[in-house]
Amino acid sequence: MDDLPDSARYEGIVVDLLFGDDRPGFGDLFAICGYENPNFPPSGRFDFKQFEDLQFSQVDDYFGVQTISGEGDDVAVWLFPLVDGEIVHHHPGPFDGIRLGYNVLRNPIERSEHFIRSIETLSDRLPVTMVYRGEAGGLEQIKKDIQEIEASWRDEGIKVGTFEALTVDY
């Protein structure tokens, strides 16, 4: 699998969307859930509410697209705020970026389409630079890596997103 780290087979794909000088705070980011947080009003410089169709909700200290079906992991796509390149929790911002994560092993392959759509939508409509595997851009590489990870598990007789996949120990 090219130079894709073996850990990606188990832990998944992560993509950073990095902001420039203008950075959102927690109130801005929270609006991705479709409504404002009364304790953290948005600054008005970012319109994350426009992304409510991506179906993110607050999950613990982060955001995620939760799965309702009995297949796969409880959260298909994670969204984490970043400060100095590190995931933060209980932080008001401003944030340097956001990290999207998707575990190929633990979710049915068709869920990867939502992950890709989330990356495309956010990177197209926000003033961000997409960074994947240490390089700017990379949407085609992300798609290729997802396919390769899924194929590698299939070659081992494991269908991604199944109960068997959820029991893989690493």
Image (cartoon, grey):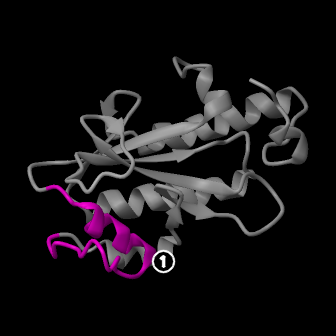
**Judging from the image, what secondary structure is the residue with disc 1 in?**
helix
Residue at the (90%, 40%) spot, across then down: 164
Q: Report the side of 46 relative to 116 (left or right).
A: left
Residue at the (23%, 60%) spot, across then down: 25
| In front of the other: 119 or 148 | 119
Query: Image quadrant for the N terminus?
Result: top right
Occupied quadrant, residue 106: top right
Residue at the (69%, 64%) spot, across then down: 67
Range of the magenta residues?
23-45
Q: Report the side of 158 relative to 137 (left or right).
A: right
Up-down relation of residue 70 to residue 107 (above or below): below
Residue holding disc 1 = 53
Total numbered labels: 1
Residue 156 in the magenta stretch? The answer is no
Query: Image quadrant for the C terminus?
Result: top right
Q: Amino acid at mark 1?
A: Asp
Occupied quadrant, residue 33: bottom left
Magenta span dominant secondary structure? loop
Q: Report the side of 53 relative to 50 (left or right).
A: right
Q: Return the x and y of residue 114 as percentages of the image width and height.
A: 57, 61
Q: Return the x and y of residue 84 as percentages of the image width and height.
A: 24, 35
